[in-house]
Structures are given as structure tokens and as C-alpha cells.
Amino acid sequence: MRVGTVREIKNHEYRVGLTPESARELVVHGHEVWVETGAGLGIGASDADYEAAGATIQPDARTVFDGCEMIVKVKEPQAVERAMLREGQVLYTYLHLAPDPEQTADLVKSGVTAIAYETVTGPNGSLPLLKPMSQVAGRMSIQAGATALEKAHGGRGVLLGGVPGVLPGKVAVIGGGVVGFNAAQMAVGLGADVTVLDRDPDVLERLGIHFEARAKTRFSNRANLAAAVAEADLVIGAVLIPGAAAPKLVTREMLGTMKPGAVLVDVAIDQGGCFETSHATTHAEPTYVVDGIVHYCVANMPGAVARTSTYALNNVTLPHALRIADLGWQEALRRDAHLAEGLNVHAGHVTYEAVARELGYDYEPYAKLLM
């Protein structure tokens, strides 16, 4: 199979779908790899590095899209990229379709076979291709929140860890999954006063055992959530419903109970965000203020630490890419039900139920396509 990767064009996105090492693995498996010139510069990988791995450098994205049977990316294809997709081609990347009707419509129209990293499953319902970026985003959320809390950036002027004689900042983490755990871990490490809210007693127990007295856990009902948000200097939104739009847990009305200059970091913004007042921002202009509350809603947070993120992502995406290339997408999905959960769009049909339900499409079960 001819597999291609292109330079990411989303605002301040520096990751790349294939590292030179991943390109080498595909070449060793007998496949041809095309790489758009400059695609790896954001992670410090030159065209020469890819050529040494056996890849062929192409002058532009159009050449790669036109010539490759599978496109491996990081972020969802932008409008100009979606126009280059075609029927029979495999797109393997993050998609986050539920809050993005325009992208979904373009993918359906193109006829492409689109496999989304974020809905590929693992044992016990885990999301292994989402996990490393959730780890990165969770850890970055505290860095970003701490910076936004600085007075020069519009915040309250609070140091999360405090100093002797001055209380630390209060951090409320909504959601105790991968993002929430990593956010709490970083906040605890800084010495902040941390509370994690979740609705799953097992998650709360696991967090309690791990953090012991270093972080508090609290069951997430309306009253507890409202109280935690009102008390916090920094709120991390870390709630995920696989493939579906995130629930709006923090309302605009609740902002009025918060401390002026407090910060909201919405890590769920890729799925529409879990704060009512959230809208996606970029690394160029990461924050905005609503009712005196600073909002940080960057939709590609891990892109800021592109080298770490790209290698962490390739560690989990490459094995599936190899199977798709070795076996073809249909046979690869037949053999691996977890990978099959990643199929979101195929030949003009929406094949992921949560996306179809959210956006009003007829749902076409992927199992019917693999018979």
C-alpha cells in the first residue's frame, strides 16, 4: 500500500502523523511511504531523516492526497484537505465528528473511509489511541491554567502552589478519567489544593487510593459541582463521552458564583466542550474572558509539545496503521473488533452510532460493511 502523511495546517499544529521511525516500519513491511516536504519539521525531523527511513518526499499535500491509498494524519482534515479526499481512500486520524457537522458532511460527500483514533477501543472499554494525548492534555491543562492565572494574562494573580504563610490555589478537576488523573497529578505536584469530581464510585476509590491525602475526591452531583466551581481558582473540564458531544456541566449562571479572574480550562473542547461558555481557541489566542472568568479552550493542546506528543501518539497508532496497510482496511477491521470501532464514515455513510445520533444521520452499522 502507498501510505502518505502531510504537514498539519491547523493553527499552531506541529505534530505529524508519521515519524521517520514509523515510516521505516511501514517500508520494512513492504509499503511505500510518501511524505509532504517539511511535514516533520515541527518535531525536528527533516526531509533527509524521512528519506533515510526509506520514504519519498513529495512537494505538496495535493500530490500526497492524490497518490496515496491511506492518509495518516494527527488532526481532523481542514476544509482544503477534505476537498482532496476521495472514495476508496482510507483516512486515519483524529476526527471528533460529533460537534463538527461541516467536517462530517464533507467526509460523507467524499466517500472516504475514515477511521478515527478517538473511537478505537481497547480492553474494558478503554480508548488506547486517545489515551496518550489525554495524558499530555491533562498535564498541560495545569501548565496552561497556572499561566492564565497570572495577573498579566487576566487571571487572579494566584500561584497554585502558594508559598509559606499563603494558602495554595484551589483546583477543581471535573472528571477522573485519563485527563483528570493526569491534571490532578500535575496540580498535586505543584502543591495546589486539589479536588477531583466524578460520578463513578470505582473511579473515586481508585483516585483516593492513589492520591491518599494529597487530593480530595467528591461525588459529582449538581450541588457538589456548583460548590467546587465556586470555590476554585482553576477548573479543569475533563469529561468525555466516547464519540459524542461533551455534556455542558458548567453553566453561564455558575460563572457568577466564581471568583473574578478564576480560570476555566476546557480539555473537552474537541468534543464541543463541557462548559456552556466554551468555544474553541488556538495557541495564537488561547484565552478569552466571559463574565470576568478566563477561558482557555485550545482545541489542539498537545500540538504545543509536538515532539513528545507525536512520538507518544505514534507508539499507539502505528500498530493499527501497519495492520491496515498489510491486510487492507476491511480485513484489518474484521480481525480486530477494537479497530473496527474506529470506523466513523465509509462510502457516504456514518458508521459510528453516537455521531449519527448527534448529527441526525442514518446509522449504518460497520458490521454490515464487513460481512
Image (cartoon, helix red, strand yellow):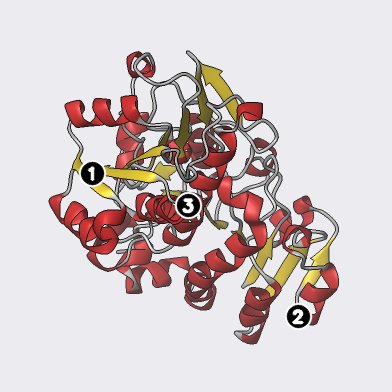
Please give the name of the residue rendered at 33% of the width and 47% of the height, measured from the top-left corner.
242
Specify the quadrant of the image occupied by residue 282: top right
- Residue drawn where x is 41% and y is 38% of the image: 167
Q: Nearer the viewer, mark 3 or mark 2?
A: 3
Instruction: Please state which of residues 134 and 342 is positioned toward the viewer in this rendering.
Output: 134
Residue 112 placement, left or right of 20: left
Near-viewer residue (125 or 232): 232
Marks 3/2: CA–CA distance: 44 Å
Q: Position of residue 219 (x, y in %)?
A: 17, 41
Can residue 279 be seen from the camera position used here? yes
Mark 1: secondary structure? strand
Q: What is the crowding at mark 1: few (fewer than 14 residues within 10 Å), some, or many (at least 20)?
A: many
Mark 1 residue type: Asp
Q: Are marks 3 and 2 in contact (CB under 8 Å)?
A: no
Q: Is residue 43 left or right of residue 185?
A: right
Where is mark 2, residue-wise?
Answer: 54
Q: Which mark is residue 198?
A: 1
